[in-house]
Image (cartoon, rainbow, N blue to C red):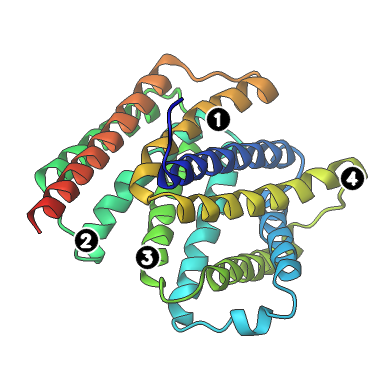
Amino acid sequence: MVQTTPEAQATGRGIGFFLIALMLFGLMDVAAKKLAQDYPPAMVIWARFAVNLALVSVLYRGRVVALVRSRQPGLQFLRGCFQMGTVALFFLAIRYVGLADAAALGALSPVLITLGAALFLGERLGAGRIIGIVVAFVGALIVLRPGAGVMHPAAILALLACFTYAGGALLTRVVRFDSTATSILWSAMVGTGLSSLLLPFFWQEVAPIDLPLFLAVGALGATGQAAIIVAFRKAEAGTIAPFGYADLIFSSLWGWAFFAQLPDRYTVLGAVVIAAAGVYVWSRERAEARRAGSNE
């Protein structure tokens, strides 16, 4: 029998939780896409954050006031705005484009985080990272096919969501002095507050049969976020990162199962190019980290 170390077992569990989170987020997108066909997206966006806030308030009951205190409230608010923008842009996009198409463009996010870390956090931007960034953008152009008139203009919103997601991820690094619970609460509060400002202008009566879907959007998002946190506690971020591209598989599966939508060959090709660029950047960073560690 093969003996595994506790570290290897923890890493395996971390990867498992990460894949579960991606599956849950994909199902959240399915519920959001179904609702967006009959309701204004503003209502779906509000449900995503309001149900999340209700769940975390129950989870941290009695400690909410203490946990909401942040050392960097301004940055936490800005981070919440970026996350709100990501959800809003992506939910608007999947109202018109397939889940697999949106996910293929969303795969650009890790590479944008690498670029943003170099521009705003002072991290080194070597030749390998530059190559990966350029190749990833080429992959995005293959998916979008600008000028061909085959992709719905709303696909641009999914591309913009990559930028807001990257901004939120970078700010998550910056506010690392706050606890995880504090960051979760701020995300839920800011998203609920901002979406509530728009809700009166778009509200319409909810059919009883659709109420479970509204609850599912928030519950799946909150549960997925919790699974992400557990995953990164059990395994290193660098080890988990390549498995993020499994989102392309889940999105294609859910798109086929619930909407009879399959990505075309150009979307598949573009997704492969973006994923290959991301894995290339990740492998270069891992190799450089190992070399730096051996030289110390």
Using the numbered discs, state the Cα–Cα distance from disc 2 to disc 4 in whole angstroms.
Answer: 47 Å
Of the numbered discs 1 and 4, the one sitting upstream in the chain is 4
Q: Which residue is mark 2?
A: 119
Identity of the amino acid at label 3? Arg
Q: Residues within 10 Å of mark 4 (few under 14, many from 20)?
A: few
Label located before the other in sequence (1 or 3):
3
- Total marks in image: 4
Mark 1, mark 3: which one is toward the viewer?
3
Q: Secondary structure at mark 2?
A: helix
Residue 142, given in percent of the width and then of the height, sits at 33, 26
Q: Amino acid at mark 1?
A: Ser
How packed mark 2 is, by other alpha carbons closer than 10 Å (few <14, some 14-19, many 20 or more), is: few
| Mark 1 and mark 3: Cα distance apart in space | 27 Å
Write the residue at 48% across / 74% down: 76
Q: Are marks 3 and 2 in contact (CB under 8 Å)?
A: no
What amino acid type should be assigned to the residue bearing mark 2? Leu
Closer to the chain start, of discs 2 and 1, is: 2
> Which residue carries the number 3 mark?
173
The reply to whether residue 238 is in sight is: yes
Q: Is residue 182 above or below residue 106?
A: below
Q: Are marks 2 and 4 in contact (CB under 8 Å)?
A: no
Mark nearer the viewer, 2 or 4: 2
Label ID, residue 207: 4
